[in-house]
């Protein structure tokens, strides 16, 4: 696995070199990974278009990023097969997720292999061949997003799109030592995605760098007006993990029977989190594992028959490319009754209530991603039982409306763990994953920003800044650091007459010369801003603050009357400089 950070491409030379390297790799592709690959000229034309847009001044957050697309997601002009060639069609439009990636400057490479109709966690149920693990081709790659995971793990694609209903965006990530971002159901529209179980399907992201994966997630997120399952981001969801999130881990009995190597790696990760100072509470997650059985062992699988049952003939036709295991799962689902479906929907509602109780004791649930890493031969010998075992810790996640991020368990480990949170806690999970990652170092750069339409900006100038005494008031409210900023030259920085000392800024009267004051910009969940305002002591308030870059944001400030009663410390560039030079200023306490 390549552990280097992704380098943003912002020049024609950088993009051209990157694309030519990628074209060379695609000329000798890993067996069975791709179903269709765009020709070199088509890839170059996309790159030239991106370069033209960059040079004309367009903002392209994914400029030159290469993307592999799972073959149940439409790409204009390329066949969508779902690894079922007898059903192939050539779409006239991109899926919404693909279109949004293109608009952000991404370059599509082709379509990747998968378990037929996205039914499987193994990567072997395809007439285009079984996809092997990137490190050991005798082992399964995981599925159903098999080709997408290996395209990223082998270094050909920067990111890849998968789909994840039962674990298809997480199990392959674990088996190939990469990251798998499984968004909240409905966060990314599934318009242009062939459904498996429409109520629980999501578009997922594979990546070698979580920051790049998050950038792709942000570009694709948000309703498109076409997908009836799409959801707007929650105004109360955290945008980052708190300073000290409480971690939940399963009881020993919940993970009995998993491969000893996976068990050892998982236990080591839990001990590492504790050594980093995080509190870990052990909870019984059996109710989640029981809910997982509803996806295939109950009537909810009827959604698969409703979606793709008509794609299979009454008689098995292997020459057409039908996979008998998938065919049997889909057609058997057609035998379920409406009463069965209604009863299992009620069981699912009760399971959701129980899941909330499990999560009430902490912030992030940590589980093994799966149970073991089987060989292709083992799957061929027992195609149903091995596949079912792999979904033990993944099948419940979409049913119970969790967000999830699959990460490697250690630098040299070939196993993985998954971080799980409530719906729309996606950014908090990614933030925590980066914070504790030992594979990629994210500390040298500022965190990836969240989309402009999620949360609201907050300018802070005093003890709420990073590393200072009141910063936890922001992080506990799910705020996310965006960067250091400077106000317009219209303000004074004053030291309030409080004990201990606190600063604020005061806007200068019209015609009076002010200064630019250094501070920080944070992004707050909308509902958290209300809680913050209610907690502010007099004379602090929130109001508009003009920044040097021309933007106006909400920030800590006070009215002009405060200036007359306070010490003007505007000769210092900001509160940090003042504190470092004036030892008499004690730290504030919450």
Image (tube, rainbow, N blue to C red):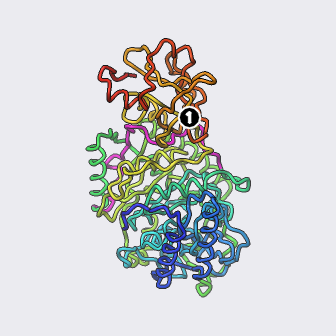
Residue at the (57%, 17%) spot, across then down: 560
**Which image quadrant: the N terminus?**
bottom left
Q: Is residue 18 above or below residue 231?
A: below
Q: How many marks?
A: 1
Asked if the magenta segment contains residue 237, the reply would be yes
Label 1: element kind? loop
Q: Residue furthest top?
A: 565
The answer to which image quadrant residue 310 occupies is: bottom right
Asked if the magenta segment contains residue 229, the reply would be no
Query: Which contiguous range is marked in magenta?
Result: 231-260
Q: Nearer the viewer, residue 210 or 307?
A: 210
State the residue position of label 1. 488
In the drawing, does residue 23 fall left or right of residue 330? left
Q: Is residue 319 above or below residue 472?
A: below
Rendered location of residue 6, percent (x, y): 44, 62
Q: How many residues crowd mark 1 within 10 Å: few (<14), some (14–19), many (20+)?
A: many
In the drawing, does residue 409 fall left or right of residue 345? left
Residue at the (38%, 75%) spot, across then down: 139
Residue at the (58%, 44%) spot, across then down: 349
Residue at the (42%, 33%) spot, across then down: 465
The answer to which image quadrant residue 173 occupies is: bottom left
Secondary structure mostly seen in magenta is: loop
Residue 300 visible in the picture: no
Q: Is residue 304 above or below residue 398?
A: below
**Which image quadrant: the C terminus?**
top left
Rendered location of residue 583, percent (x, y): 29, 23
In the drawing, does residue 571 fall left or right of residue 563? left
Residue 421 visible in the picture: yes
């Amino acid at each position: 696995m390549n552990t280097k950070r992704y380098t943003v491409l912002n020049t024609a030379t950088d993009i051209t070199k990157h694309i030519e390297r990628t074209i060379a790799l695609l000329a000798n592709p890993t067996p069975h990974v791709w179903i269709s690959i765009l020709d070199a000229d088509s890839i170059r034309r996309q790159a030239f278009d991106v370069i033209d847009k960059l040079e004309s001044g367009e903002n392209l957050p994914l400029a030159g990023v290469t993307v592999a697309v799972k073959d149940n997601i439409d790409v204009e002009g390329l066949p969508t097969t779902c690894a079922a060639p007898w059903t192939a069609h050539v779409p006239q439009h991109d899926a919404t997720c693909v279109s949004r990636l293109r608009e952000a400057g991404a370059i599509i490479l082709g379509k990747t292999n998968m378990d037929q109709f996205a039914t499987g966690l193994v990567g072997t149920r395809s007439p285009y061949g079984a996809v092997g693990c990137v490190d050991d081709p005798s082992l399964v790659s995981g599925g159903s997003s098999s080709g997408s995971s290996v395209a990223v793990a082998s270094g050909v694609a920067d990111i890849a799109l998968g789909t994840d209903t039962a674990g298809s965006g997480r199990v392959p990530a674990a088996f190939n030592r990469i990251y798998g971002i499984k968004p909240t159901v409905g966060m990314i529209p599934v318009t242009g995605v062939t459904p498996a179980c429409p109520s629980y399907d999501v578009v997922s992201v594979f990546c070698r760098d979580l920051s790049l994966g998050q950038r792709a997630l942000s570009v694709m997120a948000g309703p498109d007006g076409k997908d009836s399952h799409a959801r707007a981001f929650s105004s109360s969801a955290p945008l980052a993990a708190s300073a000290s999130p409480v971690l939940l881990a399963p009881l020993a009995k919940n993970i009995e029977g998993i491969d000893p190597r996976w068990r050892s790696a998982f236990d080591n990760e839990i001990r590492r989190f504790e050594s980093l100072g995080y509190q870990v509470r052990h909870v019984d997650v059996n109710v989640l594992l029981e809910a997982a059985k509803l996806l295939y062992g109950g009537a909810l699988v009827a959604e698969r028959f409703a979606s793709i049952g008509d794609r299979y003939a009454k008689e098995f036709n292997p020459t057409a490319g039908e996979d008998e295991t998938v065919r049997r799962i889909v057609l058997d689902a057609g035998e379920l009754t409406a009463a069965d479906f209604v009863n299992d929907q009620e069981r699912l509602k009760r399971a959701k209530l129980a899941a909330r109780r499990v999560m009430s004791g902490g912030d992030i649930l940590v589980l093994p991603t799966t149970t073991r890493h089987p060989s292709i031969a083992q799957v061929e010998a027992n195609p149903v039982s091995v596949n079912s075992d792999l979904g033990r810790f993944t099948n419940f996640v979409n049913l119970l409306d969790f967000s999830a991020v699959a990460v490697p368990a250690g630098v040299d480990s070939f196993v993985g763990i998954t971080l799980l949170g409530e719906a729309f806690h996606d950014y908090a999970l990614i933030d925590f994953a980066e914070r504790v990652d030992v594979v990629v170092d994210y500390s040298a750069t500022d965190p990836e920003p969240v989309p402009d339409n999620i949360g609201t900006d907050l300018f802070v100038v005093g003890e709420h800044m990073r590393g200072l005494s009141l910063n936890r008031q922001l992080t506990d409210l799910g705020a996310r650091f965006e960067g250091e900023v400077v106000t317009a030259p219209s303000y004074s920085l004053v030291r309030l007459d409080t004990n201990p000392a606190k600063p604020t800024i005061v806007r200068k009267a019209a015609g009076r010369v002010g200064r630019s004051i250094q501070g920080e910009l944070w992004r707050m969940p909308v509902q958290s801003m209300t809680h913050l305002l209610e907690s502010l002591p007099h004379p602090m308030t929130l109001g508009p603050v003009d920044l040097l870059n021309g933007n106006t944001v909400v920030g800590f400030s006070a009215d002009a009357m405060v200036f007359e009663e306070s010490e003007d410390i505007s000769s210092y560039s900001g509160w940090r400089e003042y504190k470092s030079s004036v030892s008499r200023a004690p730290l504030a306490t919450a």
